[in-house]
Image (cartoon, rainbow, N blue to C red):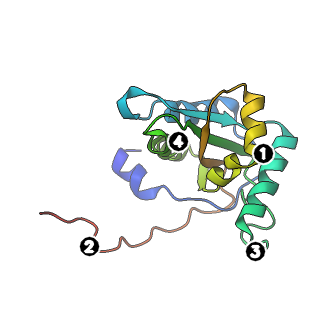
Amino acid sequence: MDFDTLLATRRSVRKYKSEVPPRELVDKVVMAGLLAPTGRKMQSSVIVRVDDPAMKAAITAENARIMGKPPSPDRGPDPFYAAPVMLLVIADASKSTAVYDGSLALGNMMLKAHELGLASCWIHRAKEEMEGPLGKEIIKRLGLEGEWIGVGHLALGYADGPLPPPYPLREGRYLSL
């Protein structure tokens, strides 16, 4: 698929099949995140694949708590939409470009996932998650030192149904001086 088509057709997906994508595809998605541009070449972001079922359940429960919303028909009780793969992007808080670096990593991963026929959705509660006790436990279990910022999660898997249709672009977002 050419790059313009890739950009125009990528969508966030909120319903996943239970089938787990092959590790080689997930690794390609992660590599796209690791190759994302970073401020001053600091490479401040870290990508964590959450494989441990207990940790995945704890992260899911914490995200549901942070949301403070009841389950919805499209999500059910799972704020990760039952995606079989959960990736967490965190960044070294001592780096001035930490959030930007992690955001670019997430963007690259979403595009790579789409190119590979996988579906994804950026889940945006990692900041609050990493500020609490669960975040401290994650940092400890990873053996990391210092302060870390949660940038986002990536729900990843195969779409259960067609991709959402494109939406019209809002006018007035390309200006000149």
Q: Residue at x 55, y 66 (%)?
A: 164
Q: Find numbered disc 2 in the image and state the secondary structure of the residue it sits on.
A: loop
Q: Earlier in the sequence, mark 3 or mark 4?
A: 3
Q: On the image, numbered disc 4 is attached to which residue? A: 109
> In the rendering, at what x and y percent does residue 31 appear?
54, 30
Residue 19 shows in the view: no
Q: On the image, numbered disc 1 is attached to which residue? A: 134
Q: Earlier in the sequence, mark 4 or mark 1?
A: 4
For marks 1 and 2, give the one nearer the viewer.
1
Q: Find numbered disc 3 in the image and state the secondary structure of the residue it sits on.
A: loop
Q: On the image, numbered disc 3 is attached to which residue? A: 73
Where residue 145 sits, quadrant-wise, is top right
Q: Is residue 144 left or right of residue 42?
A: right
Looking at numbered disc 3 in the image, what kind of residue is underneath it? Pro
Q: CA distance from mark 3 to mark 1?
A: 27 Å
Quadrant (top left, top right, bottom left, bottom right) of the C terminus? bottom left
Q: CA distance from mark 1 to mark 2?
A: 41 Å
107, 118: nearer the viewer: 107
> In the rendering, at what x and y percent does residue 61 appear?
82, 56
Residue 95 shows in the view: yes
For marks 4 and 1, give the one nearer the viewer.
1
Q: CA distance from mark 4 to mark 2?
A: 28 Å
Q: Is residue 66 left or right of residue 105?
A: right
Q: Residue at x 71, y 70 (%)?
A: 74
Q: For the image shown, how many numbered marks are present on the structure?
A: 4
- Residue 23 versus residue 153 in the image, above or below: above
Q: Find numbered disc 1 in the image and state the secondary structure of the residue it sits on.
A: helix
Query: Mark 1 packing: few (<14 Cα in 10 Å), some, or many (20+)?
Result: some
Q: Residue at x 84, y 49 (%)?
A: 57
Q: On the image, numbered disc 2 is attached to which residue? A: 172
